[in-house]
Amino acid sequence: MTYIVTENCIKCKYMDCVEVCPVDCFYEGDNMLVIHPDECIDCGVCEPECPVDAIKPDTEPGLDKWLQLNTEYAPKWPNITIKREPPADAKEFEGVEGKLEKYFSPEPGEGD
């Protein structure tokens, strides 16, 4: 099992999770974070830190595409271990449906 980041993170990109991760397995894209499944130790401390409930165990049904997305982009994006401010318009995107199709960017973020 591993934890993965899902659609709720897109365009919200709160970073509360990166500060509690003991193995620094979060990676930053332009408008979301992902978890490197091979680095995650399944401790679960990040899950309750996310204010938009974007972090899930990969054992939950229907998350295959998110496991694939995390697996694909974690090696391509820079590591992020220090919390920064979320985007100014993050609250406007909380709970919005269809963010993967509408807003996902494969571009890397800044990282640390």
Image (tube, grey):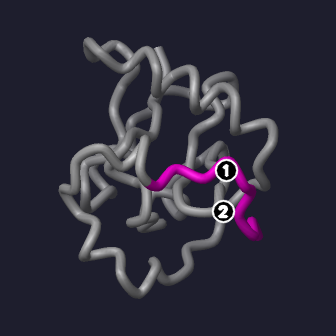
In the picture of the structure, the residue carrying the numbered disc 1 is 27
**Residue most extreme to the left:** 95
Q: Residue 107 magenta-drawn? A: yes
Which image quadrant for residue 60?
top left
Number of disc labels: 2
Q: Which residue is nearer to you in this view: 24 or 71?
A: 71
Residue drawn at the location 46% of the way across and 14% of the way down = 1
Magenta residues (range): 103-112
Q: Position of residue 63 (x, y in %)?
A: 36, 20
Percent position (x, y) of residue 89? Answer: 36, 82
Q: Where is residue 67 in the image (x, y as percent from the top left)?
A: 51, 22
Left/right placement of residue 64 relative to residue 60 reads right
Along the line of sight, the residue nearer the viewer: 103 or 76: 103
Q: Which residue is drawn at 52% across and 50% down?
A: 104
The amino acid on which the numbered mark 1 sits, given as a three-letter code, is Tyr
| Residue 43, position as x, y percentages in the image | 45, 32
| Left or right: where 3 falls relative to 7 | right
Judged from the image, the secondary structure of the residue bearing numbered disc 1 is strand
Residue 23 inside the magenta-drawn segment: no
Quadrant hosting residue 51: bottom left
43 left or right of 73?
left
Marker disc for residue 81:
2
The Cα–Cα distance between marks 1 and 2, rounded to whole angstroms, is 8 Å
Q: Which amino acid does label 2 sit on?
A: Thr
